[in-house]
Structures are given as structure tokens and as C-alpha cells.
Image (cartoon, rainbow, N blue to C red):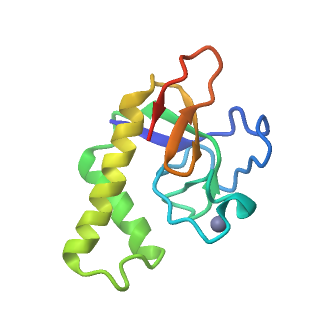
Amino acid sequence: MLVLVATNELQGTVDGDYACTVEGELVTPVVAECASPARCGCNMGFPGLASSRAVTTAQVVDLPHISEEQMREVVEDSLERDGWFDLAGEACQRELVDEHLECIAAVCAAFPIGTVVGRNGTEVFSRSPGLPDLRAA
Ligand SMILES: [Zn+2]
């Protein structure tokens, strides 16, 4: 299925770039930003679903060995591990997971496979040169 992974491609080409995830790690475009996102950089990061660290460059890739069920489990495990489920009831937990899966799918549907994307708040944009300036919010 189409997913977003952390990439070091194009890292350092934008001021404030950072890559604290593991290369190739599954990431999500959904972020709860802090009170000063531009200063801390969380407005431009994609959280890693395994490391709980973030990266400013994500890539749209097709990983046929990953099923939707497995992707759901990965998101669930990440949210639970990071404490997002602590105060959320079962229905709310499901909604949170659905939101992540829908946003990942929306970004992947908006850009060709291989595109390196960046994020600014709720906007995800192509950082790959030579591609039309498609945007998914
Ligand atoms: Zn922040």
C-alpha cells in the first residue's frame, strides 16, 4: 500500500530541516503541535511511528508487503506507546487511528510515488524538484 516514510533525501535544503527518525521508518502527517511550533520546528515535522522522533522530509512510497490492517496496528501501537490513548475512550481511540490513516492516504493520493514532501502546519507540499506544485491540506 502507499505509505509515507522518513527520508534523508533533500534533507538540509530548507532552513530548520531535521531528521531524528530512522531512514525508511513509517511516518504520519498528523501532529499535535506545541504552543510555539515555528520556533521548535514541530510545524514542519512528520512523527515517526516507530521511533517517536520526527523528520521534516517524508517520501511517498509503495510498500506492497504492508497491509491496511498492519498499518492500522502500527498507528495504534505508536499512539498507545506515546500516551495518546491514556485519556481517550475506545471510540475516540478508533477515531484517532482513522484520522491518521485517512491523512496518510490523502497525502499519498495527492503526489506521485517517490515524491519527497514537506509539511507546514496542516499543509503538505512537494519538495521534489520538477514536480507540479501539488498541495494536500
Ligand atoms: Zn513544538
128 horizontally vs 16: left or right: left
Q: Can you say which quadrant of the picture contains the N terminus?
A: top left
Q: Is residue 96 above or below residue 30?
A: below
How many numbered discs, if any? 0
Q: Is residue 124 above or below residue 131?
A: below
Residue placed most toward the observer, 12 or 65 = 12
Which image quadrant shows ligand 1? bottom right
67 horizontally vs 130: left or right: left
- Horizontal and vertical percent for residue 87? 35, 85
Q: Can you say which quadrant of the picture contains the C terminus?
A: top left
77 horizontally vs 11: left or right: left
- Horizontal and vertical percent for residue 125? 55, 34
- Horizontal and vertical percent for residue 129? 65, 19
Q: At x 40% / y 34%, what residue is drawn?
A: 108
Q: At x 36% / y 30%, what residue is drawn?
A: 109
Q: At x 27% / y 44%, what residue is drawn?
A: 67
Q: Is residue 68 above or below residue 20?
A: above
Q: Residue 14's image quarter?
A: top right
Residue sticking out furthest to the left: 91
Residue sticking out furthest to the top: 130
Residue placed most toward the observer, 119 or 58 = 119
- Horizontal and vertical percent for residue 85? 36, 78
Q: At x 45% / y 56%, what residue is drawn?
A: 30
